[in-house]
Amino acid sequence: MFETDGLKHLPEILNELGARKPLVVADPGVRDAGIVERVEAQLAGAGFDFHLFSEIDPNPRDQSVDQGALRMQELGADGIVAVGGGSPIDCAKAMAAVAAHGQSVRDLAGPGRLSRPVVPIVAIPTTAGTGSEVTFGAVITDTRRNVKVSVKGPQLAPAVALLDPSLTLSKPSDLTASTGMDALTHAVEAYTVKGANPLSDAMALHAVERIAVHLPVAVENGNDLEARAGMLLASLVAGIAFSHADVGAVHCIAEALGGMYDLPHGVCNAVVLPAVMRYNMDYCRARYARLASAAGIDFQGVEDGAAAAVRWVEGLAAAVKLPRFSSFGVDPSDFPEIAAKSAENGSNPSNPRPMAAEDYVALLKEMTGS
Ligand SMILES: [Fe+2]
């Protein structure tokens, strides 16, 4: 459902799903912004027996997931209302999986591990970027190995994605920028990975068209409802694109960096995306040119268009004031570990150009000029 002020439909959505004892899962930021209060008001007004779980980190950790699942079992929760950015929504999806399977989230990571149905999830995104409200996976930090792992299965897709652009109005410009660049990365990677197909292509190009128009405005003026709505829809569409194609090397590095340094996911993607696009250039020239068209760029011929697409992505990241990779303070002695984790990522084989650990090291060196 996509509607400004659509939060009012939450009670009827839960009734349709047969959830009378939902657990609201939200991060502390969303709670402090007063959005949880608005959700709770809807639930209280309709007589639901609900509780709140908000012990969630920005990069959700295995312990939070296991604790949340325990809470679900103690309360007999028959549904989840996940409110916030990708972290609470991913955490909620993983909690539902853990509660259904009775195993730690660490034991459920990886493809094909889920065999049981989970309680229905209503996802209410308050940032525009992750697309987690429509994807089949949840990315969680395995704190024993400091690595991000994915819990995946079609049953983890939220039963309903409730998109209300008014809920994204309050977000600060840096978060708008980083989450928006995450959506752009989903679109660019979905459009260029080996598994790209007509459905994901259409979604990815549509997302790029919208991001090109709306992201700079949403960052500049957070109260522009049209730009916020455009980005929320772009994020959703980009989420559908990559869940039907996959992501590639940008996400492999971003997840390695996020797991090791606890950096925001969108920022990691944004700083890495242009460098990976250059690395993949020979395998993606025509597709990059098509992305440039979608971004509204005039160019002459495929070669020119492909180069323009990379310049556009780099320019957009700079225009929305995202930091450069060098500002992360990543120690070059960590490059081999980042590279090894990137190469082991389940999405690495999807990257259009083969990328081994040594290629990741070379890319990291290039990005830092070391
Ligand atoms: Fe992402």
Image (tube, helix red, strand yellow):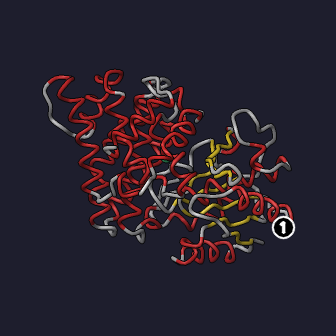
Give the number of callouts: 1
In the foreground, 56 or 348: 348
Q: Residue at x 40, y 34 (%)?
A: 362
Q: Quadrant of the C terminus?
A: top left
Q: Is residue 14 visible?
A: yes
The percent position of residue 318, horizontal first and vertical second, equals 26, 54
Q: Residue at x 44, y 47 (%)?
A: 332
Q: Residues within 10 Å of mark 1 (few under 14, many from 20)?
A: some
The percent position of residue 336, horizontal first and vertical second, equals 51, 39
In the foreground, 105 or 4: 105
Image check: 275 left or right of 268?
Answer: left
The percent position of residue 266, horizontal first and vertical second, equals 44, 53
- Residue type at mark 1 is Leu
Figure check: 319 above or below 138: below
Q: Residue furthest front?
A: 333
Q: Is mark 1 within 8 Å of ligand 1?
A: no
The percent position of residue 131, horizontal first and vertical second, equals 51, 48
Q: Is residue 232 visible?
A: no
Figure check: 235 above or below 59: above
In the foreground, 264 or 368: 368
> Which image quarter: residue 166?
bottom left
Image check: 25 left or right of 228?
Answer: right
Q: Residue at x 35, y 64 (%)?
A: 225
Image check: 175 left or right of 346?
Answer: left
Q: What residue did someone put label 1 on? A: 75
Q: Secondary structure at mark 1?
A: helix
> Which image quarter: residue 208?
top left
Image check: 263 left or right of 272?
Answer: right
Q: Residue at x 41, y 57 (%)?
A: 328
